[in-house]
Amino acid sequence: MSVPTQHEGIEDGGGSLFDEESAPRQAAAFERVPPNSVQAEQSVLGGMLLSRDAIGDVHSTGITNLAYYRLAHGIVHDAIMDMYGKGQPVDPITIASYLVKSGDIERVGGPSYLHTLVNAVPTAANAEYYADIVVQHYRLRRLIEAGTRIAQMGYAAEGEVNDIVNAAQAEMQSAAQLGAGGGVERVQWLDDMLEDYLVSMDAPPPSRLPLPYADLRKMLPMEPGDLIVVAARPAIGKSVILLDIARCAAIEHRITVLMSSMEMSRPQLMERLIAAEARVPLNRVKDRAYQGDDRQRIADAARRIAGAPLVVDDGPAATTMQLESRLRWLQAQNKLPDVLVVDYLQIMKASGKNGQNRTGEVDEISRGLKRLAGEFGIIVIAAAQLNREVEKREDKKPMMADLRESGSIEADANAVILLHRPDAYDKEHVRSGEMDLIIGKNRQGPTGIVTVAFQGHYARARDMGSGI
């Protein structure tokens, strides 16, 4: 009995789709059938119809109806999984009844085709292996589809060339890494989650990002999937705090960090990093006006820095799509960073959409960064600018409402750190040399204030009382 594929109807119908002259060329094109294994698909379904254990094995692979080349097989798969999920018996008779009620029985080839599936499987014990074969063919088809879309992008030539290239890279890399589950691996029953927690009760706590400031580390756990926003007015020290966090992770703890710096070039970033690590004033590093033991300090710092897994991207005005492309490129090399540092959010551009106001663009960028954190399972730390309302107040202390151009930043962020330096507005202030890290939002802990010593001449900050 004929069973429809996902490409059914191309060569069927009441009349010819092409004239006789073009027939050989069209026929040759139709001979290129997308990668598939009907036998593997039949064996997966036949195994599940024979054995409830096989259904569990196949389900564990994350396969969905999308992975099947034949549309009918996807329909049968969904019927099996629906009945299995409800705790109902699964066999050719019960599935046939299910498909009759849903009106799909003829679409799959009738009740007799279900028995064909059972007869096609060599052994139900290998159902998981057959499912892997189906998934591999699905991935190949997705690569072909991605290639077709990339070619269409190139011919259409809509938008900036760089955006088209980045979209093409993301399309291909996404297809290459695609499984069949479509995110089903993220779904878990509460009982399973409870069991996982009880088993882990005496295990070490979850891995959290080590931070350069002890009090901040206690108050603000940073975990994969988090978006952390560090916000301040210009020249208060956003870049200093971001670089401190990046240095602590990459140099001290050898945690991979991707730093997207739209404010500074790579040479400027390197000068700041050297000044902070070597404790040599930044102006002397920039001017090459070394004094005393500066050269020895720099040599010692260079040894500590060497081999640190810090990747710097100083391209202008990145989009979230470009950042995603860079992350996928690193992921393909098994070098996916644990932390993405973005300096800073409002410099970024929306992904090529015209006609948006700036608030809409910032909303899109904020949501995009949060999506990247969740999709790649990394920590994203982004600097953001506060509006001028801060400077109109007498005490100049920032508040959450001061986040510039977007309430979405506050909504999307897992934590927001507002920076305040009293001596930025009053050089003779009694708290000169101090910086407040005001935790205005913290989904995983308390809000409050952490005070650190701001050493702007070294382009760094330190715990209070920690010495030089």
Image (spheres, rainbow, N blue to C red):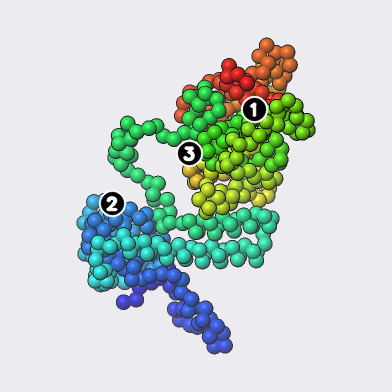
Quadrant placement of the N terminus: bottom left
Q: In this figure, which residue is indicated by the disc labeled 1?
A: 460
Q: Which mark is residue 85?
A: 2
- The mark that comes first in sequence, 1 or 2, is 2
**At 53% across and 44% down in the image, what residue appears?**
337
Q: In this figure, which residue is indicated by the disc labeled 3?
A: 224
Instruction: Kindly report which numbered mark, 3 or 2, lies closer to the viewer in this rendering.
Output: 3
Point out the residue furthest to the bottom here: 20
Q: Which mark is residue 380?
A: none
**CB atoms of marks 3 and 1 within 8 Å:** no
Please say whether residue 309 is visible from this viewpoint. Answer: yes
- Which amino acid lies under the numbered mark 2 shown in the image of this protein? Gly
x and y, in percent, of residue 398 in the image = 63, 23
Say left or right for 227 vs 277: left
Badge 1 crowding class, 10 Å Cα cut-off, few under 14, some 14 to 19, many 20 or more, is many
- The mark that comes first in sequence, 3 or 2, is 2
Badge 3 crowding class, 10 Å Cα cut-off, few under 14, some 14 to 19, many 20 or more, is some
x and y, in percent, of residue 320 in the image = 60, 46
The correct choice, above or below, for 93 with respect to 266 in the image is below
**At 66% across and 51% down in the image, what residue appears?**
352
Q: CA distance from mark 3 to mark 1?
A: 25 Å
